[in-house]
Amino acid sequence: MPSNLRQTILVVEDDLDLAEMLTAYFDTQGYRVVSAAWGEKAVSLAAEVLPDLVLLDVRLPDIDGYEVCRRLRESHKTRGIPIIFLTERRARLDKLQGLELGAVDYITKPFDIRELRLRVRNLLRRAGDLSAMNAVTGFPEGRAVDEFLQNVVDAPSDGWGVMAITLSGLKTFREMYGFIASDDVLRTTSLMIYRIASEVAGENIFCGHLNEHTLFVFLPAEDMDALEGLIAERVGGSLEYFYPNAQHESMAEGADERLGLWVGQVKAQDGPFASVADLKAKALAARRTILPNRQS
């Protein structure tokens, strides 16, 4: 399997012999394995490589595994990574503490390596199914979107359109107000867009993510202009309410990075499309600002 397609496991273990054994074993099973013997290193390495799963010891030379788990769960980048504790601690309270922190499994040493392999395999399969949905909005992304668009490319027909809608300024908003607030913006606006599209085109729609901040809606081409107008009116008119009241006036002038909307339309007649990537690229390239990143 090409290295760029291999799922990555982060092994956090200060017993170097055990860490080496786990690395070699899971490598032969087709996984990419990286390791850390210290808790602080594990936290930084997880943020760097974004592993698909973490095997985490509790007893580490610096911070313990519980603190590592806590930090991974607090970070927007790493909070969704599944964690399995591997530990000598057998007490029920220790297990409950690990599970309360968000670990998905708790395995005591010594363990059966084949059982561990099966647990890792099953967990990664479940995580792969969940990863087809965006964690913030719940709309399809990644593989699920590519499969849908592949059907569009493979079976061309007339009368359909794809609209790409980007929520701009969200990075700046996140830096100012935090991940929770920015997730609320993305979640709310995405749901509004879906409901408006359903109102305009009924069941003849499919909504998903092209990237983190960009939704797309597949719908009849004849409904695209009506959808764009309603999105500009309803979603655009609501964006200012996500800012704290005290910020309305101070952000009103010269705020080039205020929340805004970019929309692009691609229709069947703009094809043929060479691939899913070609269709995505044309939809993104067609975007233009329909709501400037400042108050009007």
Image: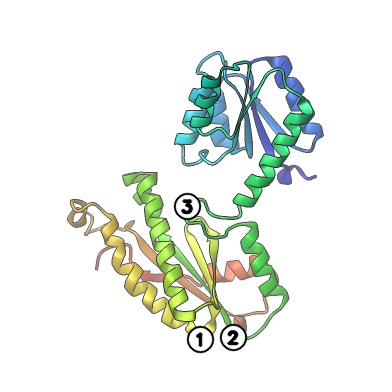
Q: Is residue 86 above or below residue 240?
A: above
Residue positioned 50% across, 41% down in the render: 77
Which numbered disc, 3 or 1, marks the residue closer to the eye? 3
* Circle number at residue 136: 3
Q: Secondary structure at mark 2?
A: loop
Determine whether label 3 and label 1 are within 8 Å by CB.
no
- Lower sequence index among marks 3 and 2: 3
| Other-residue count near label 3 (Cα within 10 Å), few / some / many at <14 / 14–19 / ≥20 | some
Determine whether label 3 and label 2 are within 8 Å by CB.
no
For disc 2, the marked residue is 159
Q: Amino acid at mark 3?
A: Val
Q: Indicate how the structure is coloured in the image.
A: rainbow
Q: Is residue 291 above or below residue 90?
A: below
Q: Secondary structure at mark 3?
A: loop
Q: Does the rendering let one see residue 208?
A: yes
Expressed as whole percent of the image width and height from the top left, the position of residue 87 reads 62, 19
For disc 1, the marked residue is 222
